[in-house]
Image (cartoon, helix red, strand yellow):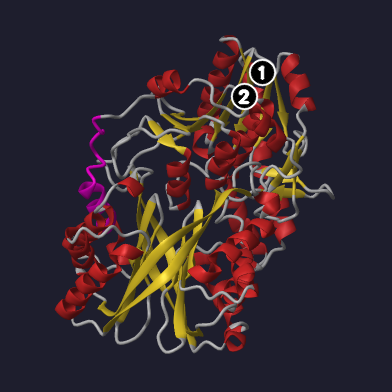
Amino acid sequence: MSLIVQKFGGTSVADVEKIRAAARKAIRAQQQGNRVVMVVSAMGKNTDVLLKLASDVSPHPPAREMDMLVSTGEQVSVALVAMAIDALGAKAVSLTGGQIGMKTDDSFSKARIQSISTERIERLLDEGNIVVAAGFQGIDDDLNITTLGRGGSDTTAVALASVLGADACEIYTDVDGVYTTDPRLLPEARRVDVISYDEMLELASLGAGVMHNRSIEFAKKFNVPIHVRSSFSDAEGTMIVAETESQTASVCGAAMTPSEARVTVLGVPDVPGKSLQVFSAIAAKKIAVDMVVQNVGLEGRADISFTVRQEDLQTTLKTLEGVVPDVGADAVTYDDQVSKVSVVGVNMAKQTNVASTMFRALADAGVNIQMITTSEIKISTLVPRSQAAAALRAVHQAFSLHQKPDDAKSWHQIRSERGNRADVDSLISRLQADALEALTLTGISLTKEQARVTLHGVPDKPGIAADMFETIGEAGIFVDMIVQGYDGEDGSTSVSFTINDDAIDHSIAVGKEICKKHGMRDIQSGTDISKITVSGIGLRSHTHVGTILFKQLADLGINIEMIGTSELQVNAVIATEKADAATGQLKKAFAASLESGAV
């Protein structure tokens, strides 16, 4: 018999009728010849009510007790769903996270799954039961109840689908699939039939609320197809798999992360080890850093800017208070009224003018860009929060995301073409690992023969970035990394981009034209540089990755010229003379996390 894992979110079990509807879906799947495991979230706003109770009782409740409290929401749901199934004439057993054998570490409120014991679930399924499992929760080695973080029921469902070898993992929610952007923000957003793990992972981390990003990490790692469907209709929904919907569309989706905060450490001595001091202190607080920008320094000093969630801002600033004197930096500035607008697409790296198209769309909408970071499949911009909605609409329209690509493929077409590509031996070895959510790196690579151009004193106003990169594109220059920092000097910014080293003379000439046209302070360039890239699954949620990278480079006396980050990659631009040594050192440092044969 095939096995299906069905996950029902809070809106899908918000009241008695919805609980009965969820029960009927599970019973229907069982009657069609499947063994069924349901993963259920807390009812509706139940978790918010519990959080409010906690804040009323204590301004700073202990993390352990918070997990004990909020985990009760799922226990209510699973019991009620099991009762509904029983009332409809089928057999069901409800289980807590501990009862399904969900072992985690002891990081309360953001625990990671280490192992899942499936014997009890398998036995109950063999006895003809629908197993109703509590999402979001587990237990640590001391039997303390732990939780996986908001949205963690998605991760529970995909993890169970992985270890049980499920034929499908169906995520039932209040929307009927994954859209090109949040349809609540843009009514013209289009539902996509298929989206790749990499694209969904970036979109999930950027604020697309359909899926929890750690669940996508799990699915990518263990090759679990995810079917996102509506709880309230029989619409086909969206498949999240290894393949993408279109081979030609440069962008598959856009996202807006509303509540971001920008932090800039000004005047950091431009010597090895300083980035390590800054980011290791932040990582020790388990704060996820997103847009990291270290631009090329002037007069021996550089500025490091990064974004964190607004809720983590005060902890970040407090942490930096103790670090800045040791680093020797001048000051720390921040802005808590910014949002991040991004576009994502796996075909982006193969096409030119994607960045300039985005920047032009923002310029035409009168949106000012404060920071820019790029990766192979993502371009992120930091914009004033008051302009975020306009920015999202502008980029969505610029890339015609409301229209289905001409070469779009359905899941049925992709499945018939793909055959059986799963590496079964590799999959089994990873499932038997001690920590299911351990960091998994897929490669450490080196791109040599690179050069860099930096423009200082870039006017901080709409349209400058668009004009710059349109001019660069028209000159036939192919740009790789783009980094726009926040330098805090005279209301201006600095922008760096990397190119192949054989294009340096042409790029400098074009850069001088841009510099003169917009009255910028100066232009700098650098050659004999290389880009070192750490790729993997869970780079952002495993906050120690950057710390290890910076430490290895600092130990070798290597200074970092530029930094760029994404959900799937961390890129550092360094001098070529030490690039091979750095690559070897990083492979040793990350040996336990590298997939067998990946590098």
Image position of 93 with respect to 67: above or below: above
Q: Which residues are magenta?
A: 390-406
Mark 2 or 1, which is nearer the eye? 2
Using residue 347 as the reference point, say whether residue 200 is left or right of it: right
Q: Which residue is mark 2?
A: 166
Q: Secondary structure at mark 2?
A: loop
Q: Is residue 388 inside the magenta stretch?
A: no
Provide residue 261's location: percent of width, then percent of height: 44, 69
Q: Nearer the viewer, residue 418 or 18?
A: 418
Q: Residue at x 46, y 43 (%)?
A: 198
Category of crowding for the residue at label 2, using alpha-carbon neighbours closer than 10 angstroms: few (below 14), some (14–19), many (at least 20): some
Q: CA distance from mark 2 to mark 1?
A: 24 Å
Q: Which residue is mark 1?
A: 86
The first of marks 2 and 1 along the sequence is 1
Q: Is residue 5 visible?
A: yes
Query: In the image, what residue type sits under mark 2?
Result: Ala
Query: Looking at the figure, which quarter contains the N terminus?
Result: top right
Category of crowding for the residue at label 1, using alpha-carbon neighbours closer than 10 angstroms: few (below 14), some (14–19), many (at least 20): some
Provide residue 74's location: percent of width, then percent of height: 65, 39
Image position of 536 with respect to 195: above or below: below
Query: In the image, what residue type sits under mark 1?
Result: Asp
The image quadrant of residue 155 is top right
Q: Residue at x 38, y 52 (%)?
A: 378
Q: Residue at x 34, y 26 (%)?
A: 409
Q: Secondary structure at mark 1?
A: helix
Image position of 456 with respect to 96: above or below: below
Q: Nearer the viewer, residue 33 or 453?
A: 453
Q: Is residue 175 visible?
A: no
